[in-house]
Image: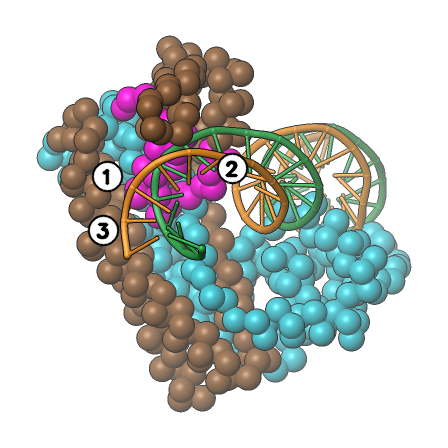
Chain colours: A brown, B cyan, C green, D orange
DNA sequence: CATGCCATGTAAGGGGTTACATGATTTT
DNA sequence: AAAATCATGTAACCCCTTACATGGCATG
């Protein structure tokens, strides 16, 4: 998966692993994140497979940079992935729900504390989506923002909706627990 | 993670890997699924680590069964996991959003088809939650349903809310695409 | 002087997925 | 007779996470 994301970004323009990491952090990380270690190793592997090329760029007074560029084979791989529609749903993996599922045997106060803390986290995330993330998206330097922006906004919309229902659900569940 | 789920179920009563798989499919699979291969191998590993014990039960006219039982060490491990509250959010991994993010370069009709198909999947899931899943939960054979049911219902509630906003978001996004 | 940011990597391990494999019983 | 369900396993692989590792520059 991370390979497709890297190809997707490199298809806008060439950049370094570090820049890719930053782009991911401000956009796709909300629905697919990656550690820098994975990004660097995947890029090397992609180069080995002919999907990208790299060259070192040395500028005075700056650390050495390795700039990656997508190849025709890389573009083909990206297009092939996008062409093949998803026929299943992405499975959820929500650890908190596993914990809630088995929480009847826990101290109710500790469950409440945990849910209230999670509520703070999700509220913070919701706020982030509405400020930083939205701004980072709109102030893009990419080639054809008018073409891409509607799709980027769409992904952010689901993120916002998701955090909204998550907070609502936490409120509801906290209330339920307080009645018990 | 799957280890905690297995311990959680075995803490209700002893059962086989096959039964564990079924319980998971009807409950936690909505937020954490597992393949039978992982369940069987994890159980063996847990036995090696003293968290469970197993014995074979042979009944006439039936395949041989291996019944697992939680040990005091297993109960302690489960309690330890539940005691330590989650301090971060579970990261999302939604492949469809990655695809939408990079969909400006795709044939809009293909994107629409994909979203409409996903809409069907999510509607179906929503319906499942409201019928089968809810029934399977309420008609439980577990020791103390009154104690556990509120928590199980809570997890289902988030599942329903999630599928609802997902469908709403798909509708909104489909509409947006049709205008372009 | 210390923290943070820029910048790139390696290595070990864990968890999960896919595929291969078998065999009996029950239902259609 | 075929398909579905019951029932248990192994093996290879892949992806991802965590930790280790380095070094320069800028800012407070």
B130 vs B98, nearest the viewer? B98
Describe residue A20's horizontal placement relative to residue A2 as left or right. left
Instruction: Return the residue at label 3.
Output: A132
Q: Residue B91 in the image: state x and y as whole percent.
A: 43, 52
Q: Is residue B22 visible?
A: no
Circle nearer the N terminus (1, 2) = 2
Q: Residue lying at the far bottom in this picture: please name it.
A: A179
Q: Residue A32 in the image: state x and y as whole percent.
A: 40, 43
Marks 1/2: CA–CA distance: 25 Å
Q: Which residues are magenta?
A: A11-39
Q: Secondary structure at mark 3?
A: helix
Circle nearer the N terminus (2, 3) = 2
- The residue depicted at 40 percent of the width and 68 percent of the height is A118
Nearer the observer: mark 1 or 2; the answer is: 2
Marks 2/3: CA–CA distance: 25 Å
Marks 3/1: CA–CA distance: 14 Å
Occupied quadrant, residue B16: bottom right
Q: Is residue B2 visible?
A: yes
Q: Secondary structure at mark 1?
A: helix
Describe residue C28's horizontal placement relative to residue A71 as left or right. right
Question: In which quadrant of the rendered image does the N terminus of chain B lie?
Answer: bottom right
Instruction: Return the residue at label 2.
Output: A37
Instruction: Return the residue at label 1.
Output: A152
Q: Secondary structure at mark 2?
A: helix
Occupied quadrant, residue B4: bottom right
Q: Residue lying at the far top in this picture: please name it.
A: A72
């Amino acid at each position: 998966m991370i390979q497709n994301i890297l190809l997707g970004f490199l298809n806008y323009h060439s950049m370094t692993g570090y820049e890719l990491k930053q782009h991911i952090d401000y956009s796709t990380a909300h629905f697919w994140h990656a550690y820098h270690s994975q990004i660097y190793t995947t890029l090397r592997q992609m180069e080995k497979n002919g999907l990208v090329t790299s060259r070192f760029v040395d500028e005075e007074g700056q650390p050495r940079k390795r700039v990656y560029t997508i190849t025709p084979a890389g573009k083909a791989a990206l297009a092939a992935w996008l062409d093949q529609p998803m026929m299943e749903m992405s499975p959820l993996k929500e650890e908190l729900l596993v914990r809630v599922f088995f929480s009847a045997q826990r101290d109710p106060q500790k469950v409440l504390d945990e849910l209230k803390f999670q509520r703070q986290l999700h509220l913070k995330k919701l706020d982030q989506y509405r400020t930083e993330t939205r701004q980072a998206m709109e102030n893009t330097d990419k080639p054809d923002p008018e073409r891409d922006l509607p799709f980027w906004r769409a992904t952010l919309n689901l993120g916002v909706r998701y955090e909204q229902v998550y907070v609502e659900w936490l409120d509801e569940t906290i209330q339920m627990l307080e009645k018990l």
